[in-house]
Image (cartoon, coloured by chain):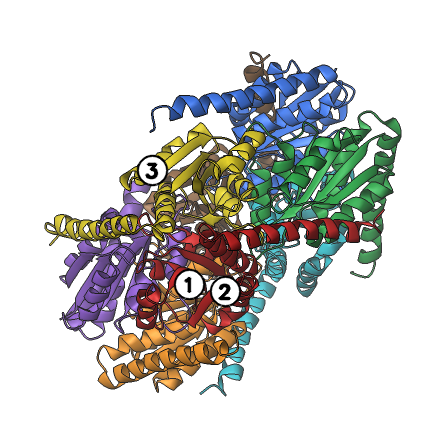
Chain colours: A brown, B cyan, C blue, D green, E yellow, F red, G purple, H orange
Amino acid sequence: MTKVGIILGSKSDMEIARVAVNTLKEFAVDFDIIISSAHRTPDRTSAWVKNAKKNNIEIIIAIAGAAAHLGGVVASKTLLPVIAVPVASTALCGFDALLSSVQMPGGIPVATMAIGTAGAKNAALFACQIAALNDETLNKKLLIHRDRMKEQVVQDSENILKNIK
Amino acid sequence: MTKVGIILGSKSDMEIARVAVNTLKEFAVDFDIIISSAHRTPDRTSAWVKNAKKNNIEIIIAIAGAAAHLGGVVASKTLLPVIAVPVASTALCGFDALLSSVQMPGGIPVATMAIGTAGAKNAALFACQIAALNDETLNKKLLIHRDRMKEQVVQDSENILKNIK
Amino acid sequence: MTKVGIILGSKSDMEIARVAVNTLKEFAVDFDIIISSAHRTPDRTSAWVKNAKKNNIEIIIAIAGAAAHLGGVVASKTLLPVIAVPVASTALCGFDALLSSVQMPGGIPVATMAIGTAGAKNAALFACQIAALNDETLNKKLLIHRDRMKEQVVQDSENILKNIK
Amino acid sequence: MTKVGIILGSKSDMEIARVAVNTLKEFAVDFDIIISSAHRTPDRTSAWVKNAKKNNIEIIIAIAGAAAHLGGVVASKTLLPVIAVPVASTALCGFDALLSSVQMPGGIPVATMAIGTAGAKNAALFACQIAALNDETLNKKLLIHRDRMKEQVVQDSENILKNIK
Amino acid sequence: MTKVGIILGSKSDMEIARVAVNTLKEFAVDFDIIISSAHRTPDRTSAWVKNAKKNNIEIIIAIAGAAAHLGGVVASKTLLPVIAVPVASTALCGFDALLSSVQMPGGIPVATMAIGTAGAKNAALFACQIAALNDETLNKKLLIHRDRMKEQVVQDSENILKNIK
Amino acid sequence: MTKVGIILGSKSDMEIARVAVNTLKEFAVDFDIIISSAHRTPDRTSAWVKNAKKNNIEIIIAIAGAAAHLGGVVASKTLLPVIAVPVASTALCGFDALLSSVQMPGGIPVATMAIGTAGAKNAALFACQIAALNDETLNKKLLIHRDRMKEQVVQDSENILKNIK
Amino acid sequence: MTKVGIILGSKSDMEIARVAVNTLKEFAVDFDIIISSAHRTPDRTSAWVKNAKKNNIEIIIAIAGAAAHLGGVVASKTLLPVIAVPVASTALCGFDALLSSVQMPGGIPVATMAIGTAGAKNAALFACQIAALNDETLNKKLLIHRDRMKEQVVQDSENILKNIK
Amino acid sequence: MTKVGIILGSKSDMEIARVAVNTLKEFAVDFDIIISSAHRTPDRTSAWVKNAKKNNIEIIIAIAGAAAHLGGVVASKTLLPVIAVPVASTALCGFDALLSSVQMPGGIPVATMAIGTAGAKNAALFACQIAALNDETLNKKLLIHRDRMKEQVVQDSENILKNIK
């Protein structure tokens, strides 16, 4: 069974990370989680990444703000798929974290999601979609999840719109 | 064996797509390729996506510029992992295609790569990395590719720098 | 008589949509309203758009945030005029929704209004202006509305400025 | 039959305007065209707009770059639908013309298209779509046009891709 | 003696305008003030501008947000110097109002100040500096104002820093 | 008679400055011109500014690119009106020079024009407009100039449009 | 022993400056601090910079917002290393202060740090790192500081994550 | 005597690096130079940085484009001062490299210079200024260099302006 490794650059990214954690729990996907900075604890980060495969991690989610190097630094040390979630933690509205994550040069891919909680949710879902390529049960859960989202939209439409006219 | 599906929004994206194609060929990963627009041929796009799994496609790469909806439109119709490559095809330097690709709302993930050729190369590599989770041969090829990149950097360093001092 | 179809990508866009709704009511223009996401409920969106003409809808207003694909997705399935209202619902101050809405490639037009409530009001007014091309009564209402705006500006000028000197 | 009024802020916008003109010609939609600046010839602009309805113009396309006020200035003087095409004519890559066109305050709508030639084509198509609400012949032409675009995409897909594998 | 004309696009710009007003009062420079929109009340705006010289106005300050066309529209109808103050009144942090004000095409100058209150203060000071070219008394007041600013900086430096070490 | 002082931050700004020079010559307005950098020759800049009034300069035009501090540095040392022309001389498309020029803090105004040649032309015209407040001959020249621009627009409209239909 | 000179453009920058001050205190590095504006008190700023070396200052930290010219103005008058900290004090989210600080033309370097408190902390640390080149005691303190940051990250990781699973 | 270490992320950064090299040569400052990527050769980069001090390197200049992580990655492994030069090597005009370099989180400073050749020159000059704190000969060379820049500006002013009037 797939295990996802979640790495946060700072404890201030925890609020965003929790959304990824909850999504993985919802799909009963196992995960490891660690706070380790690309800059303040580069060796710890490096060690964690290099041991990831040995620790049965298959997919990594890196969550960081500002000059968000974490995704790139992690990706440079592993062939496991790395998904980045930029966090808007500075004055620049997340433009810094987004561009630092997504504009990776050719050779070392980092799959970037949206800034903030939407990105954290989608990072977890994307990890599940990768895992589901070889896990029919998980695939069915994802189908059900999509169906539930659809029902929720229909419900929202009915609830909110009934008193608009 | 994994097959990657590549979808381009327009023939003008072909120059970028070729980089992805060449990278997949380098790793002997099979692929289907199609030009189909999110806007001009929505039903064709939809049909291709819905048949992707049946056609043994496991991972999709969507390449588009301007208001690049292709990644999101494709992702909305499949649980296969979708990777987007934004193309800088308008006056806005690719900011439009990047933001249209990466800022997906929670629920439907699109894994976004860098704008242009770097992103196209990385999209193909990322697809290979996903496939390599269950393909040790491919994993070894990726390791060799990384080693070659390393050697190339060392070579570049020696070649270029020998006459600098 | 003209009927306007309003489509929202998410219930969180309701606050913005209400401004469009109120404006249409002010002009006694009939409307349908639905929450349907380009990404989470693509088939529902598609079905609604394809039935729009049959349901006597003449003009469509699409309201969405983030990677706001809704306007483009709707426009790809109908020849009815589609007006988009970008919503600032992420860290990026609405730049994402604006560029995703307005930078449509040649072939499938989406008429984009300003971000947020100003855009929602103008989307409704623009729909009225289109309808007024063949509805002299509505045209007169729009003229009166413009006159009232003028009077309001004069009033504002007098009210606020009387105690400034 | 509908007549479209095209107004350009400067002769340097002619290259962009020609795309709109050619598109209207393709659909045999009549048009008037004038160069008149919001800033250098405000009275000429004003007179042209005020006479537009009398001259049987039903829809106006305003094409301008830099601080592109033309769309707003035109819209302030008529209830005819005004479509703006921003032109990238300064160092700022069209961000100035786009924001000046689209961010209209509530009350006076300007329907903004993409920057440059894509926007010019779509402005003309959008005008046709409005006109087609009451012109079944034009509506059929638009349907055929969409079908041709679809065939072109399929053709592009076949032509270009045949030698890629 | 110089009179400055202040024109606001909307009552919501009043908070910013008050800073300009207070600065002019500080220098005992006479002013007229009016709320008149470039878009909602174009004729009122035009009439006010065309009468400005007759009303002894020598310099105009135009304060507006969003697609801030007011400065350009005013400048197109007068040879009096026009100073624009962009207001950050939309989601886009004032980038829209700034670019709409400053990127005027060659031929019709608009002197643009900073966004918001800093710009409003400087617009008034700049108007005073123009007036002071022919008013030695006003020039002396400006010199004293600069001296006071200097003293204030020294005072701030002493006050705040005394308890920092 | 008014004399304008033009200061350039670097010889590379000469191409832009020439537009200001030619415009002043067109109106027979006297000018001094100097290359002096805010950063490389701060004392030279300071001396030139401090002597400006003595040298009968009434209005200053500062032309600079990159972190364009020249306008602000000049304005900090004189009460003469200072007009800035940002130059797009770096990778950032002139955003750096524009923001460095226009976002002056309250107290020291710098009147900013558009980036590049349009701004240079308008800086000269704006200087003329200030001078024309007390120079009826110059005011008439400006009126004639505006009339010529109008005629040129009409001419452009006729020339270019005659073969479009 | 090294002394750092801290210069603030305005008392409103004090909140940011305090972070730099506290960091220097933590390392027992001596400092002078002054509020002096590039624009409001240019001569005071100039005098302070010119006396800096005489006052045993070796490194200067310049903290300013808006069109943040302070770093450049200071650097133009000294060969001491100048570090700039941009402050987000306007509507533009700090883009103005950042670009005004970092985009210095060739010849006069300004070492720019991140916007706001992160930048202020790093400016102080960077000054310490320069000083530590010739101060082994300080170098050891910096090593200990890095170790403490590492321990803090590990601690954060343990504290926060213990109740996540 | 000081030795500067120059590290480039890719051979494509060589054109920019050459400006830094030439500047160091001009001041007879010794340097090592290496191409080593943060992402493609992380261990090589790490080894080079960790040996820098042993190799008598005192100051490091990191030159990289796109998601320019090189400065941060280098700074995370050394207490030597690290200066970053962002390179505009993608569609985004250098915004990506600039934000990735400058927006470092608190704790690990990276001194960022301007994008491109101006930044490369200033990085070398800044390194010289640091070295000159303990090298009076170098300090004198820097003073002479500044004097030469001043003379050059005066010369430029005379040369270019002699035929302007």
In which quadrant of the rendered view does residue G63 lie?
bottom left
Closer to us: B5 or H159: H159
> Label 2 lies in what chain?
F
The residue that disc 1 covers is G103
The three-letter amino acid code for the residue at tag 1 is Gln
The three-letter amino acid code for the residue at tag 2 is Thr
Badge 3: few (under 14), some or many (20 or more) residues near its Cα, within 10 Å?
many
Image mark count: 3
Q: Are marks 1 and 3 in contact (CB under 8 Å)?
A: no
Left-right relation of B57 to H118: right
Give the residue furthest to the front: F137
Residue shown at the point (24%, 60%) measured from the top left: G124
Q: Find residue B26 and report its horizontal and vertical position in percent.
A: 67, 65
The three-letter amino acid code for the residue at tag 3 is Val
Q: Secondary structure at mark 1?
A: loop
Q: Find residue H77 and report its horizontal and vertical position in percent.
A: 33, 66
Q: Secondary structure at mark 3?
A: helix
Q: Find residue D23 and report its horizontal and vertical position in percent.
A: 81, 44
The residue that disc 2 covers is F90
Q: Are marks 1 and 2 in contact (CB under 8 Å)?
A: yes
Cα gap from disc 1 to disc 2, whole angstroms: 8 Å
Closer to us: F24 or B29: F24
Residue shown at the point (71%, 34%) measured from the top left: C75
The residue mark sitting in front, 1 or 3, is 3
Badge 2: few (under 14), some or many (20 or more) residues near its Cα, within 10 Å?
many
Q: Secondary structure at mark 2?
A: loop
The residue that disc 3 covers is E19
> Label 3 lies in what chain?
E
